[in-house]
Image (cartoon, rainbow, N blue to C red):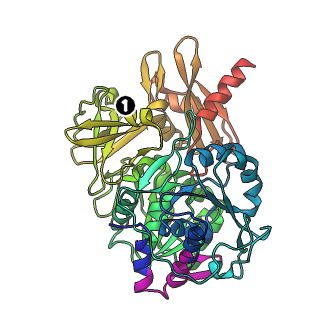
Amino acid sequence: MANLATNIQSVAAEQPDAVALSFRGRDVTYGEFWARTGQFAAGLDDRGIGEGDRVAVYLPNVPQFVTAFHGTLRAGGVVVPMNPQYKSREIAHLLSDSGARAVVTLSDLVPFVEEVRDDTDLEHVVTVGEAAEAGTDFEAFLGDDHEPTLADSADDSGVADSAENPAVVDRADDDVAVQPYTSGTTGQPKGVQLTHRNLASNAETAADLVPEGIRTNDKQLGVLPLFHIYGMTVVMNATLFNGGEYYPLPEWDAQEAVSLVEDEGLTLMHGVPAMYNDVINQPNAEEFDLSSLRLAGVGGSGIPVEVLRQFEDLYDVKIYEGYGLTETSPVTHFNSPKQGRRVGSIGKTLPGVEAKIVDDDFEERPPVEKGPVDEEETDLDGVTGELVVAGPNVMKGYAGLPEANESAFTERDGTRWFHTGDLGYWDEDGFFYVVDRKKHMINTAGYNVYPREVEELLFEHEAVADAAVVGIPDDRRGETVKAFVVPVPDADVTPDEIRQFCLDRLAEYKHPREVEFVEELPRTTTGKVQKFELRERETTEGTE
């Protein structure tokens, strides 16, 4: 195995005239795309940026992200992807901690970079947009008259001054290729060191889970953000490494995404649960035609079973749920058509990946006979433990954090196991089930409540469009259960009715004693509910 960028090189050599990227009516062939990465790599080399140097990519889902990503790898550098919704205080840590020497960003985001630049090692700011101050317009790099020019605002020489086509810099399997950062819901975000082997193995395996593999005539919807490992590996890289067409969208919009699927006949779609929920809640949801899709995948967090069923009933398209983390490149489990599907499960482990459920002493929990279990009739505490994984996709480690690495891994019999922090169980058929995050579990009067179980029930109520459950302080019980509910438009329902609905169907200690209606839930750009914000809101309001 070599530099991750050689996967693009191989496809470009085999089918230079095939479409690699399609963005708002403009197609870019593999030959054009490979030339762009070469020019970008040459520009980095001209500035002394090469092997092991960090290049931050601070962009939404646009073609320039894909070029900067693979151009940096081609030059031997390390990509540091950053959320384009972040502001100066949020990017400050990522830039300084990674030691990035260059950043590629939209011209509109340059002020956030400049605000923190003096506290970083940044030498070059590469801008995408009409407001780039100095620099040579770089039409050869973009190859697109419809998109803004790209120039280097650090000087006026342009990112690449010639049509030079540099060789791919050799990198070892265990050299770091990408350093994304964890979401940082507790403490500072941690830099995750993902190697060329980590990312190549996961992209290859993820593509093979599609029936007949990802084909050259496949068209992939690119709505998952590229700064996030799911969109980067499973969507962008898996598609491009197999010669398919990638259709990036800069931001999620249900109507635009569905129209793109319909108009272009897209065949592959991956999303987070919130996206599928958005689609089925559109006023004209029954009119959508998604028949061109041959696979719809979901990850990022568990999809409510009711959302899955409604989507499948409306469009006759099966959703296959998977599981993974940034630290695992990301996929470890998937309900693939090849391995079978079990609704409510995260699926079986990917080929080459190992997983098991362990207790606090790292003793293996026995599997149940067949899942999913009836959580009303089964003592979950008796079968549940932490999910740990091992395999070629598991990160090298957190950058510069030896203590975090020590707690993240356990060595047993020559295998290096990564602690996911997720609680779950498994069955004798090899399917795994995640019940919740370890840190989300609610302990009320000595009883454990898994928020996801309550959330699944809430989604069954016809008046509930979205919901999240958290534990809040309670003088008598220590914690109690609270549900934040987004009602469907014009719903005739009260919080008390929602409470009673749950009480009628759950053990008394599990039902939400408080229900609050809200207009929307705080979510990350990848669709995860930011439960810490809901808990903080509750704590803040309680002290006012």
Q: Position of residue 215 (x, y in %)?
A: 39, 77
As for residue 498 lying within the magenta part, the answer is no
Residue toward you, 426 or 13: 13
As for residue 30 lying within the magenta part, the answer is yes
Relative horizontal placement of residue 165, taking residue 257 as reference (left or right):
left
Q: Position of residue 326 (x, y in %)?
A: 46, 49
Query: Which of the 4 quarters of the picture holds residue 496?
Result: top right
Q: Quadrant of the C terminus?
A: top right
Q: Position of residue 438 (x, y in %)?
A: 43, 32
Q: Residue furthest left?
A: 413
Identify which residue is drawn at 66% across, 57% down: 123
Identify which residue is drawn at 47% across, 54% down: 308
Relative horizontal placement of residue 360, taking residue 483 as reference (left or right):
left
Residue toward you, 316 or 476: 476
* Residue 505 seen by the camera: no
Q: Residue furthest top?
A: 476
Q: Which residue position is annotated with label 1?
A: 376
Residue toward you, 361 or 88: 88
Query: Which of the 4 quarters of the picture holds residue 44?
Result: bottom right
Query: Which of the 4 quarters of the picture holds residue 264?
Result: bottom right
Q: Position of residue 447 (x, y in %)?
A: 42, 20
How many circles with numbers are drawn on the protein?
1
Q: Residue furthest bottom?
A: 17
The crowding category of the residue bearing disc 1, from other C-alpha atoms within 10 Å (few below 14, some 14 to 19, many at least 20), is: few
* Residue 370 seen by the camera: yes
Amino acid tagged 1: Glu
167, above or below 231, in the image:
below
Identify which residue is drawn at 32% across, 73% down: 212
Relative horizontal placement of residue 48, taking residue 504 as reference (left or right):
right
In magenta, the rendered stretch is: 12-38
